[in-house]
Image (tube, rainbow, N blue to C red):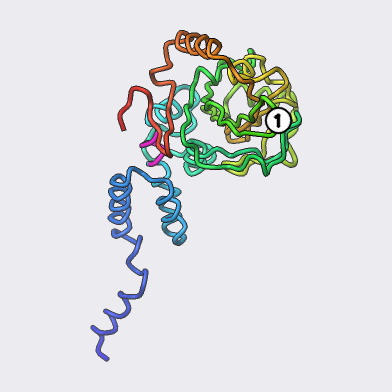
Amino acid sequence: MDNNTKRVRRTSRPGSDSLGGDSGILNERVLVLVFESLKWDLHTLTAVAAVNRKLAAVAARLLWRELCLYRAPRMLATLTSGPAPSAAASPGGRIDGGWKALAKLMLFCCGYRGGGGTGFPSPSNSPGHVAKASRFSKTSGRSFLAKKCRGDLLYVSDPCEHPTAEAGEDLGVYRGIFRGFMRSKTRAFLVKRGVRLEEKVRCPYCGARVWSMTAARLVPRSAARRLGSRDGGLEYFVCINGHLHGMCWLIPLSSSDDDEDGAEEANSDGELDGDCRGKVENGSTSSAREKM
């Protein structure tokens, strides 16, 4: 066997030219083009990221971020700007908890998995699922901030309704994210007060430990009004990366109540149809003024 034959066999081993050297850059470009043509389908990206470690690394570094930017560009622009951004403003910036966790938070309702202290049903009644439709709002987020923390910026989704056996009330599951949580007033207050992290509850999006806002007494009454719940009928947690998840009892509203709530929200700060909202439908996200 001559040297040329050995050289060919040495360089043609399976996987030796995938995602390595210059070919890695080219493959990443191809992957981006492929997912752009697929409109950043969540299920396909999840499957690709599970193929091997190299593709998982590419997904963690690039693809999950691109999915987030595609799904909710205005929300991402807000989260990555301002005095305390969650990520560097550069295209290669990182975000607290990672881009995969943020993509999951945008598109996945975590359901109810225990840890609530207000008499919620068993976890088996409310499994997690890809959300068919969700809206994230800064206006709603302000309703979840105590007065001493009103300078923070928080996006919160509308509650996802989960039917239960309780007569007249469904379980609402919601989620959200802080901008720049490490520098937020909320975190500073939790640390200063010495609120302990929960032992049995973890963030369903990044796996980090969480604080109970109920235990910290940082649940304003405006949160229940915003959700359409009753006082004492909600609970939510915030993890060390600034991801929020919670649940509440939803009180059925009459048609007149619905109309009043819509008028109040539309007039609250003029952001209902603007940058404050990202709408997720069938695994895709857009603002009311954006065309995807």
Q: Which residue is mark 1?
A: 166
Q: Nearer the viewer, residue 283 or 93?
A: 283
Q: Position of residue 65 (x, y in %)?
A: 41, 41
Instruction: Provide the residue span drawn in magenta.
Output: 67-71
Q: Position of residue 104 (x, y in %)?
A: 50, 41
- Left or right side of 17 for 200: right
Q: Residue at x 37, y 35 (%)?
A: 90
Q: Position of residue 209 (x, y in %)?
A: 67, 39
Q: Nearer the viewer, residue 219 or 288?
A: 288
Looking at the picture, does residue 213 appear above or below residue 121?
Answer: above
- Left or right side of 170 for 104: left
Q: Residue at x 45, y 51 (%)?
A: 46
Name the element at disc 1.
Answer: loop
Q: Position of residue 127 (x, y in %)?
A: 61, 43
Looking at the picture, does residue 186 appear above or below residue 66?
Answer: above
Q: Residue at x 53, y 26 (%)?
A: 158
